[in-house]
Amino acid sequence: MNIDSILQIITIGSAVLIVLSILLQQRGASLGAGFGGSGELYTTRRGIDKNLFEVTIILAVIFVLSILAGLILPAFK
């Protein structure tokens, strides 16, 4: 396996994991909150919600870096 195929696997894998981590995150407000149905506008993240949020950020950084590496590395060949 060359570096290009490894970067493609990392990019696709991180993209799938980002989608899953975003879908697993809970929404703090329902549709009624957009129309003033809820008095709570800001909540802090705690526990597993905070960990999942941080994992999502890390996966997004890995995704962007793998794309940039895929664009930059062929220029050095």
Image: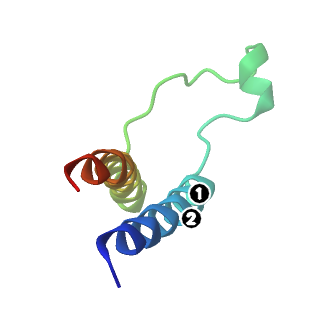
Residue at the disc numbered 1: 19
Of residues 43 and 72, the one nearer the viewer is 72
Percent x, y of residue 8: 45, 66
Determine the residue located farthest toward the left in the rendered image.
76
Residue at the disc numbered 2: 16
Percent x, y of residue 34: 73, 19
At x 73%, y 14%, the residue is: 36
At x 80%, y 26%, the residue is: 32
Of residues 12 and 29, the one nearer the viewer is 12
Of residues 23 and 34, the one nearer the viewer is 23
Relative vertical location of residue 58 with respect to residue 5 in this rendering, above or below: above
Of the residues shown, which amino acid type is indicated by label 1?
Answer: Val
| Quadrant into which the N terminus falls | bottom left
Of the residues shown, which amino acid type is indicated by label 2?
Answer: Val
Relative vertical location of residue 5 with respect to residue 26 in this rendering, above or below: below
| Quadrant into which the C terminus falls | bottom left
Is disc 2 in contact with disc 1, using a CB cutoff of under 8 Å? yes
